[in-house]
Image: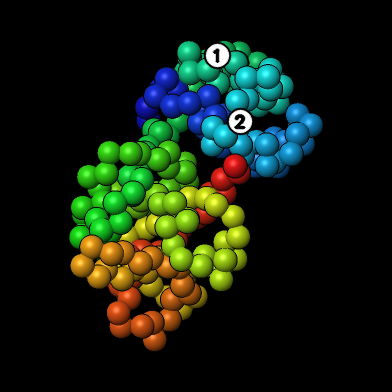
């Protein structure tokens, strides 16, 4: 168990960390402070500066503003400020060079990192990556109607109904798409991984 080091992320990232540690949804936090859950999402992804709402967020989550600003690792427990020990904050590769997806571990060399969801297991953390949902063609077909981030698990075991990221590599051209897994996928498509989650981004 490691002490959270907030100074490695953004204010929005700290809001997300604190909200997840308090085990409440974006919608619940939004209701507490009189905003929409879409605005909370914009705060957490850095699309909107949350500075004017930090006081309300601090009170709603019962944490000091200094935690949100990354100045301390102190959280409130039983009305006292204490060092809060929790799961270590992890980051996973954010893939922008799609050709790397066709080599077993090449994607792990990507320099950009994405904050991993706190619920991910150790095995998932070692074998997952994040990727822009717009990298896949026609994601709307499976209900992904908004821009966001796919969290994808590299795996070799799939069951019918899993949502998978597939790809086709033609020399230096990459075509990616999301599909529902079945045993009759086109032979020219390689299954890259299983979608674990989708994080919506608001512009």
Kindly identify the residue that appears in the image at 44 percent across and 23 percent down: 6
**Disc 1 or disc 2, which is closer to the eye?**
2
Rendered location of residue 141, percent (x, y):
56, 71
Closest to the observer: 84 or 59? 59
Marks 1 and 2, how far apart at CA: 19 Å
Colour theme: rainbow
Residue at (75%, 29%) from the top-left corner?
33
Q: Which residue is mark 2?
A: 48
Image: 141 above or below 32: below
Question: Horizontal placement of 163 versus 98: left or right?
Answer: right
The relative height of residue 81 versus residue 191 in the rendered view (above or below) is: above
Q: Quadrant of the C terminus?
A: top right
Kindly indicate the quadrant of the structure image that contains residue 110: top left
Asked if residue 126 lies left or right of residue 119, the reply is: left
Nearer the observer, 47 or 156: 47
Residue 19 visible in the shown view: no
Residue 107 pos. (x, y %): 26, 51
Q: Residues within 10 Å of mark 1 (few under 14, many from 20)?
A: some
The residue sitting at the bottom extreme is 184
Number of marks in the rendered image: 2
For label 1, the residue is: 66
State if disc 2 and disc 1 touch (CB < 8 Å): no
Residue 122 position within the rendered picture, expressed as x and y whole percent measured from the top left:
34, 47
Residue at position x 42%, y 20% in the image? 7
Q: Residue at x 61, y 37 (%)?
A: 42
Q: Nearer the viewer, residue 157 or 141?
A: 141
50 vs 180, left or right, is right
Which comes before the other along the chain, label 1 or label 2? 2
Helix, strand or loop at disc 2?
loop
Horizontal side, residue 27 vs residue 8: left or right: right
Q: Can residue 39 be seen by looking at this rendering?
A: yes
């Amino acid at each position: 168990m490691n002490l959270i080091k907030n100074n490695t992320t953004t204010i929005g990232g700290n809001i997300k960390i604190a909200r997840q540690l308090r085990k409440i949804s974006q919608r619940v936090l939004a209701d507490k402070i009189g905003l929409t859950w879409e605005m909370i999402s914009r705060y957490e992804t850095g699309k909107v500066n949350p500075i004017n709402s930090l006081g309300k967020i601090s009170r709603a989550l019962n944490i000091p503003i200094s935690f949100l600003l990354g100045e301390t690792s102190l959280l409130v427990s039983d009305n006292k400020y204490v060092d809060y020990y929790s799961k270590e904050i992890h980051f996973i590769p954010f893939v922008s060079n799609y050709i790397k997806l066709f080599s077993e571990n090449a994607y792990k060399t990507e320099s950009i990192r994405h904050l991993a969801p706190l619920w991910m297991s150790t095995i998932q953390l070692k074998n997952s990556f994040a990727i822009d949902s717009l990298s896949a063609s026609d994601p709307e077909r499976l209900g992904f109607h908004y821009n966001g981030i796919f969290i994808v698990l590299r795996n070799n075991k799939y069951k019918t109904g899993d949502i998978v990221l597939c790809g086709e590599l033609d020399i230096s051209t990459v075509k990616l798409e999301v599909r529902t897994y079945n045993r009759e996928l086109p032979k020219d498509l390689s299954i890259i991984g299983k979608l674990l989650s989708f994080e919506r981004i608001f512009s």
